[in-house]
Amino acid sequence: MDKGYDTVFFIPLSAVLSGTSQTGQSVASEFEDQIKTYVIDTGRAATPLRYLVSQALDLVEAGAEPEEVVAK
């Protein structure tokens, strides 16, 4: 937030495998008045996450709206 960012994409392990997604939702709610946070439940484990994060970064760098990044 102090770096000038206004949006966060949090891409944790699948909610079925870990409570990290729920923790992300809690943190997002706590800071919702300061920064927009999208918690994306990919339904995946570790290895495919790297690819999904890379895809999300590519979309952001191409100027995609946050909702478009989440939808893809």
Image: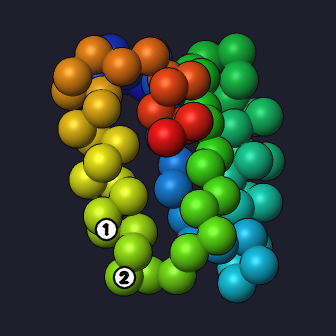
Q: Which mark is residue 47?
A: 2
Work out which quarter of the rendered image holds the N terminus and state it: top left
How far apart in space, not on screen, are marks 2 and 1 (Cα)? 6 Å
Q: Residues within 10 Å of mark 1 (few under 14, many from 20)?
A: few
- How far from the left and from the top, in percent, is residue 68? 50, 25
State the residue in front, 27 or 62: 62
Q: What's the image's color scheme?
A: rainbow
**Under tag 2, what secondary structure?**
helix
- How far from the left and from the top, in percent, is residue 8? 48, 34
| Residue, disc 1 | 50
Q: Residues within 10 Å of mark 2 (few under 14, many from 20)?
A: few
Tell me: residue 46, above or below residue 71. Answer: below
Q: Amino acid at mark 2?
A: Thr
Q: Which mark is residue 34?
A: none
Question: For the point 39% across and 75% down, which residue is it?
Answer: 48
- How far from the left and from the top, in percent, is residue 21? 69, 61
Question: For the point 46% across and 33% down, which residue is it?
Answer: 69
Question: For the point 30% across and 64% down, which residue is it?
Answer: 51
**Under tag 1, what secondary structure?**
helix
Tell me: residue 20, above or below residue 32. Answer: below
Whether residues under marks 2 and 1 lie with C-beta atoms below 8 angstroms apart, the answer is: yes
Residue 12 in which image quadrant: bottom right
Q: Is residue 24 visible?
A: yes
Which residue lies most toward the front here? 72
- How far from the left and from the top, in percent, is residue 36? 59, 23
